[in-house]
Image (cartoon, rainbow, N blue to C red):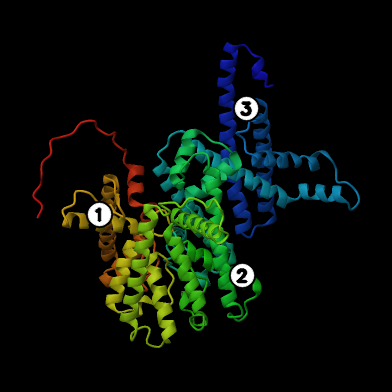
Amino acid sequence: MKLIDKLTPSNKKIAKYYIKQILNSVDLLTYIISAITLFAIIYQHGFVINAYQHSVLNGILTLSWIVFLFNSAIHAILDSKYDKKGISIIKYILSISLYLTLIPVIFSEPSGENIIHSLWAILHSEIYLEMLIALLSLLMLSAGIMKLLGKRTNPSLIFASSFFIFIMIGALLLMLPRSTYTGISFIDALFISTSATCVTGLTSVDVATTFTPMGLSIIIVLIQIGGLGVMTFTCFFAMFFMGNTSLYSQIIVRDLISSESLSSLFSTLIYILVFTLSIEAVGALIIFLDIHTTFPGYTIDDEIAFSIFHSISAFCNAGFSTLPNNLGNYMVMQNHNTFFITISLLIVFGGLGFPILVNLYNSACYELKHLMARVHKRSNPPTRKVHLYNLNTKIVIMMTIILLALGTATILILEWNNSFASLSVEDKFVQAFFNASLPRTAGFSSISPTLFSTPTILIIIILMMIGGGTQSTAGGIKVNVFAVVLLNIRSFIYGDTRVTIFHRELTHDSVKRSNATLIFYTFIAFAGLFLLTLFEPEIDVLSLFFECVSALSTVGSSLNTTMKLGVDSKIVVITLMFVGRVGVLTLLSSIIKQRNNSFYKYPNEDLIIN
């Protein structure tokens, strides 16, 4: 029983107030120490440090250890919720691990080589303490974000701010001496960090020759975080470490990950991570089997790292490559069609979106069960579902197939005797499919877009503007929006008062948001083009427009323009990538206060249109 339970009701109320203030102050101190500690750990591993700096960083680690011990003890004594089921088991494990670090402090090193001595050595090691403090720091910072959600902070503002924070952290990490071979400017580090976090793929420097393995690791982590979604990643850590959170926080997280219920939020987050990592693992395995022994001087570890990097980059629609000349490298351009088809399929799957993939997976499992029941002739077969695929899945799949088929056929015809002239017939079909998949917002390149004819470039621009599915790793206006706009046009031409498809009527809000998205996208794309024409008058307009659409749609393709841009132009492209990934409507709703719905109507009046 807590000490507060022994007080009278009046004194208990006063005591609760002061206890809450104490706990909040201790938590605030821990938040600050957590941030400082993470930066200290990053500095220690990112720079070549001397003995004095090492001692200072160890001092920060020791201070953080003391603060976390104090925080855990004060919560255990004063916090009435500490021993309830709302606290995650992971938090208990971390707390116990923290208290175990007191053993080397209290007891001297045991003699002899035995289990007790090995345990004492592990608990006394700097690596154990560093990893533990890093996890606890992530726990505290994730808890802080969830508290912001609990305070009814604008979710759109938190979403946009989280992307901005990760981009800035990524830029600072890429500037670490151990991240590059010869150093990098802040604007280029910011550009690459934005491109990675926003899963774009545009690069202002040559990635393969600029970044060390540590730098490439930072880039791929940023890509994975950006592909999963910053808030999905953060909320997973918060719920994983903290257990249950406030009801309002859970509602916000449910909306962010499109879950249908509050009871399965954590399992849904786990499902997202496992589902994503499983697809990437399968892709990496196929890539590894195809490129094995392809690169001279590559060890098995190098080939595994290459496969994982490109699988993640493809599924997250990022388009980064560790090869000079991207995927146009001569070592993969010949006899590696399996590699290009795998990359293409990963791009397509990533561009469908998690809700679509889950619906397809569940439908496939249902069909398999139904088939097995028929094969075994069970007496009570499962009832056949009427609506196996939801409307969103039908629209995205239909539009994806149409766009891929038309894109592949058009590029194949236009480039058959142009950029594909030197390729075999099989390679031509594969490269046509590959280059039709890329505008779904993956910035790989096997054949430089500068070799394409102007009609092909215009087709690619249109495909880039459309992009992939909603709530996917892809950008653009999204195929859902494009489909709704076309359906709205069709309903207008036929004089229908409703917008319908597959015997379903679309809501007025869906049509309104789709039209607004298309208009805002067009306005921002031309605003970016206007600024680039001012800053880069020597570059032709088509190349600049291609760059704007590629950045805003988070595609990453370029007509060899990116590295020619000045600082001002790079800032414009960085802004376009950020806006394209966060979303125009999300960004506006985070800045502009939403009005309450009015319960009255003004008189209707028609405007003369046409």
Question: Looking at numbered disc 3 in the image, what kind of residue is underneath it?
Answer: Asp
Please identify the residue farthest to the front as the structure is shown. Answer: 379
The residue wearing badge 1 is 519
Which is in the foreground here, disc 1 or disc 3? 1
Quadrant holding the C terminus: bottom left
Residue 176 visible to an observer of this rendering = no
Marks 1/3: CA distance? 51 Å
Tell me if mark 1 has few (under 14), some (14-19) or many (20+) residues whose alpha carbon lies within 10 angstroms of its own.
few
Give how far across and how far down residue 101 sits, in percent: 75, 42
Give how far across and how far down residue 555 sits, in percent: 39, 64
Give residue 603's quadrant in the image: top left
Question: Looking at numbered disc 2 in the image, what kind of residue is underneath it?
Answer: Ile
The residue wearing badge 2 is 304
Residue at disc 2, secondary structure: helix
Left or right relative to 18: residue 502? left
Q: Earlier in the sequence, mark 3 or mark 2?
A: 3
Question: Looking at numbered disc 1 in the image, what kind of residue is underneath it?
Answer: Ile
Give how far across and how far down residue 566 sits, in percent: 36, 66
Marks 3/2: CA distance? 47 Å
Give how far across and how far down residue 423 sits, in percent: 42, 86
Tell me if mark 3 has few (under 14), some (14-19) or many (20+) residues whose alpha carbon lies within 10 angstroms of its own.
some
Left or right relative to 16: residue 445? left
Marks 1/2: CA distance? 44 Å
Which is in the foreground here, disc 3 or disc 2? 2
Q: Between 271 and 116, which is closer to the camera in this rendering?
A: 271
The residue wearing badge 3 is 79
Residue at disc 1, secondary structure: helix
Q: Earlier in the sequence, mark 1 or mark 2?
A: 2
Q: Are marks 1 and 2 in contact (CB under 8 Å)?
A: no
